[in-house]
Amino acid sequence: MKTNDLPATLQRLREAWRRAKPGIAQREADLRRLRTALRARQAEMDAAIRADFGHRSTHENLVAESLVTLAEIDHALAHLRRWTRPRRVSVGWRLWPGRARVRPMPVGVVGIIAPWNYPVNLALVPLVSAIAAGNHVYLKPSEHTPRTSEWLRTLLADVFPADRVAVALGGADVGGAFAALPFDHLLFTGSAAVGRKVLAAAAPRLTPVTLELGGKAPAIVCPDYPLRTAARRIATGKWFNAGQTCIGVDYVLVDAPRREAFVRLLLDELGARYTDIARNPDYTRIINDAQYARLAHYVDEAREAGVEVHQPFGAGDAAMRLLPPTLLVEPPAQLAVMREEIFGPVLPVLGYSTLDEAIARINALERPLALYPFSHDRGSVDRIVDGTLAGGVTVNDTLLHFGAQGLPFGGIGPSGMGAIHGRAGFETFSKLLPVFEQHRVAATDWLRPPYRGLIDRAIRLLAR
């Protein structure tokens, strides 16, 4: 698509929305058609994603892309009529007998810029919220997953009229022009560096923006927690999709006396999950050469600095973009792997002496998108959660808060702004319109100059 075609498509979407704003019945029908189409084309989806990555686990595609999206649709269908209902709110005794309500209103045309790491889920989940809220949608999928982006374009063209949902395909030039369009709301999911550019592009038009970014999500294992269970669950949170997950575990803090035992258990866990890594159907490739080179540099820099490196399946294959699971034990803070979001299958493991020290290490970095405390002691969990601030938390496991549709999903500061999923997503793409209704008889009929006598005494009483 050419960049100069973008404004005309947006105008078509907006004019259609103004002519006939989607009612609740249409929204429900749209979501049901999307659900049916997605289920019917799961094999096509899987093939497209595997081709874009070089290889990606079919089962991880079904879980992360299909299952999560279908669950989001089901949740929206189950709750949509309640979400759209005006909500009565108190006006307080000073404004009695007036009445007030909050009425969710669609905003118009929502722009969605989706990333490459979960190219279906992170395109369709916000689209579900935008459609549920009564909007039209303009989607820009990632250029790094061209086959999946084309599959999305075909899927959505078969489900929605062209003036209700449109898809813009293209590279960074199209993405930059897309972000500058006068949307009624814009959602971007991706890196913080690109998120800053999106925010800057939207600023001249004061377009409301939701950013879903990333960061260095820590797991912290407390002394009371069983190491084997922690190793199993952290391994899933790290090596699912070969670590290319915005809420994936970025590094682990474990109480120092058990650090070596934890590393051994992680290595055991990897050995049980994967055998011949090059031929393993369950291990995903790195998306492109640039990402592979970045990750390989982290490992090389750590090795040159004398860091203990564990690569139980070898050093990897750049031609295949195959980077095996890698453990780094106690990498120093100045290394790039400890300063930047890893977004790959490299896991630093660090020991700590006290819980306060571990919390301080987390707080020394920017606020992450996710936090994973492991402890059966409620006091320890509360100390970690109260002493830090992250976009979301899963206690004694990893990743799962993303799949809970009733929880808002979003970052804080460098890890993002705003929230999606479930009702939070519906309200993100709505204007929660405050409506006050005055009674036939109202005190304001007498609230006028001259402020003397009874009016003077009433105002002074109200202001006490």
Image (cartoon, rainbow, N blue to C red):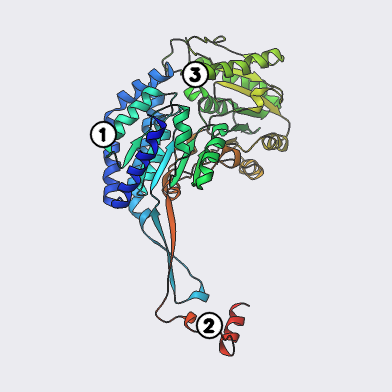
State which quadrant residue 114 falls in: top left
Evaluate whether residue 68 shows in this view: no
Q: Is mark 3 on a helix, strand or loop?
A: loop
In percent of width and height, residue 180 lies at 48, 39
Amino acid on which disc 2 is placed: Arg
Q: How far apart are marks 1 and 2 (CA)?
A: 60 Å
Label placed on residue 158: 1
Amino acid, disc 3: Ile
At label 1, which amino acid type do we have? Asp
Residue ID at (67%, 16%): 301
Badge 1 marks a residue whose secondary structure is: helix
**Which structural element holds mark 2?**
loop
Residue 448: give its label: 2
Q: Which of marks 3 and 2 is nearer the N terminus?
A: 3
Identified at 32% across, 46% down, the residue is 77
Return the x and y of residue 329 as percentages of the image width and height: 67, 20
Q: How crowded is mark 2: few (under 14 residues within 10 Å), some or many (20 or more)?
A: few
Pointer 3 or 1: first along the chain: 1
Q: Residue at x 51, y 32 (%)?
A: 190
- Name the N-terminal-most of marks 1 and 2: 1
Instruction: Give the image location of residue 302, x and y in percent.
Output: 67, 17
CA gap between label 3 and label 2 equals 70 Å
On the image, numbered disc 3 is attached to which residue?
A: 286
Horizontal arrangement in the rendering, residue 356 relative to residue 165 (left or right)? right
In the rendered image, which quarter is residue 221 located in? top right
The answer to which of 431 and 129 lies nearer the viewer is 431
